[in-house]
Amino acid sequence: MSWNEKLKKIPYGGDYNPEQWPEDVWEEDMKLFRQAGIDTVTLNVFSWAALQPSEDEYNFDRLDKIVKLVTENEMNIIMATSTGAHPAWMAKRHPDILRVDYKGRKRKFGGRHNSCPSSPTYKKYAQRLAMKLAEHYKHQRNIIAWHISNEFGGECYCENCENAFRNWVSDRYKTIYDVNKAWNTSFWGHTFYDFDEIVAPNELSEEFEFMGRAHTDFQGISIDYKRFMSDAILDCYKLERDAIKEIIPDANVTTNLMAFFKPLDYQKWAKEMDFVSWDNYPGPSDSPARIAMSHDLMRGCGDGAPFALMEQTPSVTNWQPYNALKRPGVMRLWSYQAMAHGADSVLFFQMRRSIGACEKYHGAVIDHVGTGNTRVFREITALGKELRDIGNATIGMRTHSDVAIMFDWDNWWAVEYSAGPSKDLAYRELIADYYESLRNMNVNVDIIGQDTDLSKYKVVIAPVLYMVKGDLDERIKNFVENGGTFVTGFFSGYVQENDLVITGGYPGKLRDILGIWVEETDSFGPDKCNSFSYHGQRYPARILCDLLHLETAKMKDDYGYLEDFYHGMPVVTSNKFGRGKAYYIATSSDESFRAAFLSDVLAASGVHSLMYASEGVEVTSREDDTATVIYILNHGDAEGIYELHDEGMEIINGIEFGAGMHKIAPKDVHIIKIMK
Ligand code: GLA
Ligand code: ZN
C-alpha cells in the first residue's frame, strides 16, 4: 500500500526534537500541537550518538518515551534512522568513517552528513541501527513512513572511495581498453594499463587549472566520479532501506531530497524510494515559478506520484546571508503551492526552536518565547484548521501535463564541467527560463528524465540537451514522427553518454530530426549581446550564437537574422518530421521572446492554458477519475482575477463557485473541485 493511501487528511507537522529538551517541556509541546492541528511528527533525525553509546550498546529508552507520548496524543510518526550524523566515539575509534575533501584533506569529527559512503564502519553500523530500529518499532502502528538518514549528499575522495571507484569503473566498462576509449585517455598521454592506476579526480589530480574546480581536464572521468559518488551514497540508502524492509516488508521508505541538488542523480534515486519527499527552502530571489519548478522536478522523479513536502520553514531560515521572514500569508500560500504541484503533506522543520548551536535562530512552530501567542503560531493554527476541513479531498490526485521539460543529471554535470564554449552555461538557469515562461501561461509542466516515455506529451522541450544518452534520439524521432512537437536549441546533441563528441556535424544524432547543421558557435560574456528578429520584433541573443545551416528545416521570412559576420543566418528553425515538428533556437534570449515563441508553439500543438489569470496568479490542477481540482494561488501583492470555465466547489471554505470571472485577494488561495 502506498504511503498516502490510508491518510484521512494531509499530514501536518514536521521535525520534532524533544531529545533536546527536558521532559516537562514535552507536555507543553503536546498541548500546543493539539491547538495547532499538528498530527504528524518526524522523530529521531539526529540521535545516533544517543541511541548507540558504544560499539555494542543500544539504548532506545528515551525514544520509547517520545514515541509513547506522541502516540497517546494520536499523532502519526515518520521515523528517521538517525544516520545523518555519526557519533564522536565512532569517528575516534574508526577514522575510516571520516571523509576526505576535494582538496585531499582528511576531515575530523564534526558537522553532519559527514560519513564516507565507502567506509566499512559506517555501512555496518548504519545498517545495524536501521535494523534495530525496525525490530524495535515493527508493531508501532502509527509509523506512516521511514525516513533514512537526512539530506544525503556531499562527496568523499578517501582511499576507500578511490578503490570503490575503480570497482565501479570496472563494472561499467569491464576492460581497461574500454575505459581508455570511454575517457579518450590518449589525450595528454593518460593511457591506463591497470585499474589501480586510476585515481579520484580532485584538486590533486584532474582539476582544469584555467577554470578551477567547476571544470576538469577529463570530463569523462569526472562525470563518472559523480555517477559513482551518487551511486555509492545511494547504496548506503539501500542498505538501510533493505534492513528495514526485511523486518517490515510493507514499510514505506523515503529520504528527504533537495530538488535541484547537483551531487545526487535523484532520477535514479527515486526509483529506489517508495515515495519521494523533499525539503523546500527557496532562496531570497526565487520567484514563485522557481519554487514550482522544484516541486515539479520532485514529482517527476517519482514518476508523477504524489510526494511529501518533508520540510519547510514556518517563518525564517538561519543559514542564508540575510534571512527574511515569510510575510503574513506566505507560509500558507507556499504550503498550498506544494499541494498544487503534487504534495500530499505539509511538514515543517522544526517544531520547537532549539536553544544552542547553529539552528537556534531557525524558524519553528514553537518559538523561544514558548507560547502559542505569536504571529507564526497563529498562522500555523489557521492552516491546521483548513487542512482538517479539506480532509482527504485531494490526496492521491495526479497532475496531467501536455508539456514536458527534459532535465537530466548526467547532462547537468557534463554541461557544467565542459571547458568551453562558455562558463555561463548554467543548466538549471536555462531550464528555469523555459519553465518560468510556461508557468506564466498557466500550463501544467512535467519535468522528465531522458528515459521517460515521451508519447503522453504533446510538447517536449529539451533546452541544452548536450548529452544524448542511449536511444533517446530514436525515441525523440518516434515522438515527432507520431505528431509530437520537440523543441531544443544551442549546445545540444554534441556528445554521447561518456561525453565523447559525436562526429559528423552538430547537433549529432539530432541533426536529421531538426534538419539543421551547426557549423560554429560564438560566445559572449555578460556585457555583449547580439540580436535577431522573430515575427518582426527584435530580441537579444546572449551567451551563445550558433552559426547554422538549414538542411530540411525551414526558416520563415521573419525568423531571425543575427548581426555580425554571420548575419543572415537562421536563429529559430522548424522542421517537419513525420506528423510532428522539431524546433531549434540557436541562442539564449529573454522572457519576451520565449513568451512569443512558446505561445506560438503551444497554439500550433493544441496545448491550452488551464485558464486566464491576471499577473502573479498561478494556476495548476490535479485530478483523479471523478474530479479535477484547480489551485489558484495569488502570489502578488494586489487583488487578482481569474476566469473559471466550469462551476465547482471551493474546498477550503466550502463555497460554490460559478463559471466566470472571480477575484482573489493578495496571497490568497482558492482550491476548486470540479466534478467530471
Ligand atoms: C535541512 C535539514 C534540517 C535543517 C534545515 C534547516 O533541510 O534537513 O535538519 O537543518 O535544513 O533549514
Ligand atoms: Zn571515502
Image (cartoon, rainbow, N blue to C red):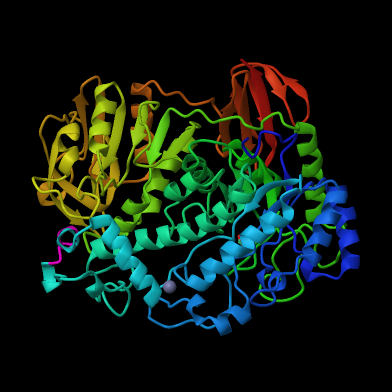
Q: Quadrant of the N terminus?
A: top right
Residue at 47% from the left image edge and 43% from the top image edge = 301
Is 79 left, or right, of 276 in this rendering? right
Instruction: List x then y, in percent, for residue 657.
Output: 71, 20
In the depicted structure, whether residue 263 falls above or below residue 360: above
Magenta stretch?
180-185
Q: Is residue 195 magenta?
A: no
Instruction: List x then y, in percent, for residue 331.
Output: 69, 49
Instruction: List x then y, in percent, for residue 318.
Output: 64, 67
**Which of the four quarters of the rendered structure image does ligand 1 lie in?**
bottom right
Q: Nearer the viewer, residue 293 or 549?
A: 293
Q: Examine the image and state in which quarter residue 174 appears.
A: bottom left
Is 262 left, or right, of 188 in this rendering? right
Residue at 87% from the left image edge and 55% from the top image edge = 30
Q: Is residue 181 magenta?
A: yes
In the depicted structure, whether residue 352 falls above or below residue 615: below
Q: Nearer the viewer, residue 95 or 595?
A: 95
Question: Taken as a whole, is the magenta stretch helix, strand or loop?
Answer: helix
Is 504 left, or right, of 510 in this rendering? left
In the depicted structure, whether residue 298 falls above or below residue 156: above
